[in-house]
C-alpha cells in the first residue's frame, strides 16, 4: 500500500507520517506520496487530480467530435481537486462558473479564470473556514446558501468534492439543463439512482475510477523520481500525466466498444480494469 493525501490529508499530514516512517525505518524512500517538495515530493502533485480529470475530459470530447474551448463548467468544492480543475479548464479555453462548499455555492458568470480568483481558492482552503461564501464576498458574485451548483445551466458538470454529492434530484436538474457530459472527478460522487437516470437520458458519464486517476498517476511518478534520485520539471510531469490520461480514456473507450457497449465509459472502465487484472 502507498499512503497518499486525500480529504483532510495534505502535505503537512504526509510530512508527519513520512518523518515517523523515516525515524522508524532509517530510510528515505517513496513509500508515502504527496510529500512536500523539500523532501522528495513531485511538482504538479497538488494539481494532479484536477489536471488529469480535464485531460480525460478533453480526450473524451475529441472522440465525440467536440472541444473544451468555449464550454461552460459547473464544478463543486474548492479544494485542491477543484483548484487543479479550474486551472486546466481555463488553460484549455473553457470557463468554470461555479464553486461550492458546505454552506452553498457561488455563481461567477464571468468565469473563475483569473490568477487572482484561482489563487483565492487556495486562500479559502488554507483559512479552514470552509465557506465558499468568502469568494462571493470578495468578488461580488451571487451566493446561493444551502444549495448545490447542479441547478446552473452549463455544458459540462464536474463534481470535485466528495462521495454521493450528486443524488437523483441533482441528476434531474443536470438533465433538465441540457448538460451533455457528466464527469466524476471526486471519488464516487454519484448515487446509483442518479447514474441510472443519466444513462437513461443520454448523458455521457465519465466514471471517477478512470477520471481521477491523475493523482495516483503522479504518485507513481513521484516514486519513480525518488528511485532515480532525480526531479522532473513541472512541464515533464505534466506531459507524462497528459499522456497517461489519454491512454486511460482510450482504454475505457476501446473496452466498451469491444464488448458491444460503445460510448458507455462506466462499463469500459470496469472491463478495462478487469481485463488488466485477468491478463
Image: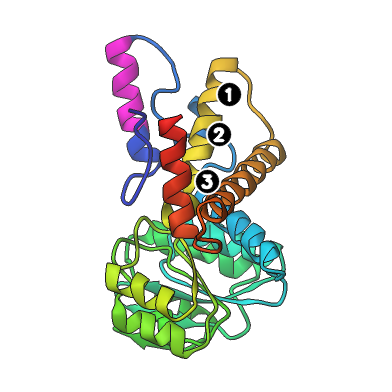
Disc 1 designates what residue? 225
Q: Position of residue 78 (x, y in %)?
A: 44, 65
Picture disc at residue 42: 2
Estimate how packed mark 1 is, as few (under 14), some (14 to 19) or many (20 or more) residues with alpha carbons within 10 Å.
some
Q: Position of residue 274 (x, y in %)?
A: 41, 40
Q: Which residue is at the front of the view, 237 or 25?
A: 237
Give the distance between the C-alpha atoms of the residues marked 2 and 1, in whole angstroms. 8 Å
Residue drawn where x is 70% and y is 41% of the image: 239
- Which residue lies most toward the top here? 26
Which residues are the magenta region? Answer: 15-25
Where disc 3 sits, the SS reads helix
* Mark positioned earlier in the residue sequence (1 or 3): 3
Picture disc at residue 136: none
**Cβ atoms at labels 1 and 3 below 8 Å apart:** no
* Mark positioned earlier in the residue sequence (2 or 1): 2
Q: Position of residue 163 (x, y in %)?
A: 30, 61
Residue 133 visible, this angle: no
* Mark positioned earlier in the residue sequence (2 or 3): 2
42 versus 40 height, above or below: below
User: Which mark is nearer the camera, 1 or 3?
Assistant: 3
Q: Could you tell whether 140 is left or right of 24 in the image?
A: right
Disc 3 designates what residue? 214
Estimate how packed mark 2 is, as few (under 14), some (14 to 19) or many (20 or more) residues with alpha carbons within 10 Å.
many
Residue drawn where x is 50% and y is 50% of the image: 49
Residue 3: name its quadrant: top left
Where disc 1 sits, the SS reads helix
Amino acid at each position: 500500500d502507498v499512503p497518499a493525501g486525500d480529504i483532510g490529508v495534505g502535505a503537512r499530514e504526509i510530512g508527519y507520517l513520512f518523518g515517523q516512517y523515516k525515524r522508524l525505518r532509517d530510510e528515505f524512500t517513496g513509500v508515502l506520496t504527496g510529500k512536500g517538495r523539500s523532501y522528495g515530493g513531485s511538482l504538479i502533485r497538488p494539481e494532479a487530480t484536477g489536471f488529469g480529470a480535464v485531460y480525460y475530459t478533453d480526450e473524451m470530447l475529441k472522440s465525440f467530435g467536440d472541444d473544451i474551448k468555449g464550454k461552460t463548467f459547473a464544478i463543486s468544492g474548492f479544494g485542491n481537486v477543484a483548484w487543479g480543475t479550474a486551472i486546466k479548464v481555463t488553460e484549455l479555453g473553457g470557463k468554470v462558473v461555479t464553486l461550492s462548499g458546505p454552506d452553498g455555492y457561488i455563481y461567477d458568470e464571468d468565469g473563475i479564470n483569473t490568477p487572482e480568483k484561482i489563487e483565492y481558492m487556495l486562500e479559502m482552503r488554507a483559512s479552514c473556514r470552509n465557506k465558499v461564501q468568502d469568494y462571493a464576498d470578495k468578488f461580488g458574485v451571487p451566493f446561493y446558501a444551502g444549495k448545490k451548483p447542479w441547478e446552473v445551466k452549463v455544458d459540462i458538470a464536474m463534481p470535485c468534492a466528495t462521495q454521493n454529492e450528486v443524488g437523483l434530484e441533482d441528476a434531474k436538474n443536470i438533465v433538465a439543463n441540457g448538460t451533455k457530459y457528466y464527469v466524476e472527478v471526486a471519488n464516487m460522487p454519484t448515487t446509483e439512482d442518479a447514474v441510472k437516470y443519466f444513462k437513461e437520458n443520454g448523458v455521457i458519464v465519465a466514471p471517477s475510477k478512470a477520471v481521477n486517476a491523475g493523482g495516483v498517476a503522479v504518485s507513481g511518478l513521484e516514486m519513480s523520481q525518488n528511485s532515480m534520485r532525480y526531479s522532473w520539471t513541472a512541464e515533464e510531469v505534466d506531459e507524462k500525466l497528459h499522456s497517461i490520461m489519454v491512454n486511460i480514456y482510450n482504454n475505457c473507450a476501446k473496452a466498451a466498444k469491444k464488448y458491444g457497449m460503445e460510448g458507455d465509459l462506466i462499463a469500459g472502465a470496469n472491463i478495462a480494469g478487469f481485463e488488466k487484472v485477468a491478463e
